[in-house]
Image (cartoon, grey):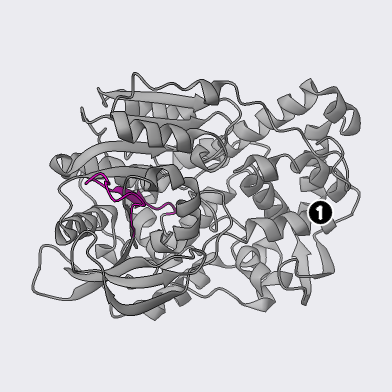
């Protein structure tokens, strides 16, 4: 059942740094036709959600670059060829989010968002090691019995241990960000591109910064959207979620329609949390995605997690006051509907996510940082606690301190942030900008996470790739965007 994925991990692990867009994994149908873009190493293929033939291929790389003749991994990639015959020689390389998203599985969304880019440039999609068809570390968490458990009864460490047992053939400590970037660079060389332009969304922005640090000679420009620089710690998101939720409460109070319909919304939210902590509600529903009968325990953890993920995108954010109000009135249908919306994300490969974050981030999270992050009335310490539990059983390796210093570069870079982002706040973009001397930081006042998905930022990216001039970019379309109104009832009043 599709809802089970979210219920098992209480929504904490499903969409941490993911672009907030609904996608399904594309089916690949390779043909015998050989492509000449950019080399003969590609074969024609079809990806679900894209009508025309594109190109696909794979490349073997070392599991451990320090032991290049030992175990090899297969890296999967696809190229969406430029539409114009007089195309530019440097493609747009997509660095997926997560960590744990597979770039090729995002092909329909990427093809839509970057249609203007594709007019003149190839778009290169590479499944990061551990995702998609690149040695996937996919863990099935679809245990129906977990749906009816309380928050305290869901044992995330046991789930992580069960997941870990599926991958004894790998050294999971080699599935890290630096090796991923080395894989990408191997694919670039393999395909014969002299330079690439980078687009990294969310965790992909960190991957982009690492690419700038490790292989600056290979990069023409970089776009970093929802910036997570290596010096920050990813995983504990209580404080950032609470800040974004407080902005929602302020916006509701400033709107007479929202304030009149949902008075004291913040108090109502806290009241719902306390009630569900004291007495979780077992309800019988139909799965909003499959229509199959389903029992689910509505708990404080699941409720607050759905609220947090709902803040990722304006179209779900605008529903939250109504969902809070109805949940307080014991009408759980809107909450379940929103839960179904948030679970329609592209798959996240949990084994890769834990392999990256447990060693690179949670290992740097001090007790003081975790305590400060959990000091809020929105979601508390749930995101940090979830990772602490799962990382307690996951293989880890100490990472060099130089991995986590600010990345310095003079390569033309466009930094994008959403003021309402609940996971990668604009302050992180400003932090990265301090050492990127040829960069510009654009903040969408009414944007949330990965703003190319819901603002005109995708148009800015297309223009930026043509000029490579961040300072001269006209950003007026971002500045004039208006706030999305809140939905006031089940009929969509307020739109």
Q: Residues within 10 Å of mark 1 (few under 14, many from 20)?
A: some
Q: Using the rendered view, name the quadrant where residue 320 is placed.
A: top right
Which residue in the protein does label 1 denote? 334
Name the magenta segment's main secondary structure.
loop
Residue 114 in view in this figure: no
Residue 341 in view in this figure: yes
Residue 390's x, y, as percent?
47, 62
| Residue 95 highlighted magenta (yes or no) | yes
Q: Using the rendered view, name the quadrant where residue 130 is placed.
A: bottom left
434 left or right, relative to 106: left
- x 60%, y 31%: residue: 243
- x 36%, y 43%: residue: 199
Quadrant of the drawing holding the N terminus: bottom right
Quadrant of the drawing holding the C terminus: top right
Q: Nearer the viewer, residue 323 or 125?
A: 125
Residue 456's x, y, as percent?
52, 33
Q: Is residue 400 above or below residue 30?
A: above
Q: Nearer the viewer, residue 273 or 443?
A: 443
| Residue 140 highlighted magenta (yes or no) | no
Residue 475's x, y, as percent?
47, 22
- x 12%, y 75%: residue: 70
Q: What's the magenta region?
A: 80-98
8 left or right, relative to 50: right
Residue 108's x, y, as percent?
49, 59
């Amino acid at each position: 059942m599709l809802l089970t994925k979210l219920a098992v991990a209480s929504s904490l692990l499903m969409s941490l740094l993911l672009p907030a867009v609904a996608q399904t994994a594309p089916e690949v149908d390779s043909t015998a036709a050989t492509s000449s873009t950019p080399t003969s190493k590609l074969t024609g293929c079809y990806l679900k959600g894209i009508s025309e033939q594109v190109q696909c291929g794979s490349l073997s790389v070392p599991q451990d670059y320090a032991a290049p003749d030992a175990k090899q991994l297969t890296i999967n990639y696809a190229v969406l060829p430029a539409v114009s015959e007089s195309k530019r020689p440097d493609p747009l390389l997509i660095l997926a989010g997560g960590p744990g998203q597979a770039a090729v599985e995002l092909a329909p969304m990427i093809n839509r968002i970057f249609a203007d880019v594709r007019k003149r440039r190839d778009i290169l999609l590479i499944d990061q090691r551990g995702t998609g068809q690149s040695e996937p570390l996919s863990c099935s968490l679809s245990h129906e019995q977990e749906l009816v458990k309380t928050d305290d009864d869901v044992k995330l460490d046991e789930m992580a241990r069960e997941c870990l047992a599926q991958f004894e053939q790998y050294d999971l400590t080699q599935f890290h960000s630096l090796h991923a970037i080395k894989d990408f660079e191997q694919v670039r060389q393999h395909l014969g591109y002299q330079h690439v332009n980078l687009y990294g969304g969310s965790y992909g922005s960190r991957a982009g910064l690492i690419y700038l640090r490790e292989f600056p000679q290979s990069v023409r420009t970089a776009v970093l959207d929802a910036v997570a620089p290596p010096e920050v710690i990813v995983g504990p998101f209580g404080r950032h979620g609470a800040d974004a939720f407080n902005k929602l409460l302020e916006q509701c109070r400033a709107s007479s329609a929202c304030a009149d319909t949902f008075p004291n919304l913040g108090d109502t939210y806290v009241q719902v949390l306390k009630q569900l902590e004291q007495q979780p509600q077992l309800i019988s529903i139909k799965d909003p995605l499959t229509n199959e009968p389903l029992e689910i325990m509505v708990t404080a953890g699941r409720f607050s997690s759905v609220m947090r993920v709902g803040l990722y995108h304006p179209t779900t954010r605008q529903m939250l006051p109504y969902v809070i109000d109805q949940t307080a009135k014991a009408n759980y249908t809107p909450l379940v509907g929103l839960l179904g919306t948030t679970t329609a994300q592209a798959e996240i490969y949990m084994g890769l996510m834990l392999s990256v974050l447990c060693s690179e981030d949670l290992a740097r999270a001090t007790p003081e940082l975790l305590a400060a992050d959990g000091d809020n009335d929105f979601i508390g310490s749930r995101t940090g606690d979830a990772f602490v539990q799962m990382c307690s059983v996951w293989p880890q390796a100490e990472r060099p301190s130089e991995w986590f210093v600010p990345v310095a570069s003079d390569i033309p870079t466009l930094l994008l942030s959403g003021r309402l982002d609940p996971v990668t706040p604009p302050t992180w973009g400003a932090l990265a900008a301090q050492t990127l001397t040829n960069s510009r930081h654009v903040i969408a006042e009414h944007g949330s996470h990965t703003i190319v998905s819901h603002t005109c930022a995708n148009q800015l990216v297309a223009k930026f790739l043509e000029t490579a001039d961040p300072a001269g970019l006209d950003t007026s379309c971002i500045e004039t965007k208006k706030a999305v109104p809140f939905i006031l009832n089940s009929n969509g009043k307020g739109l």
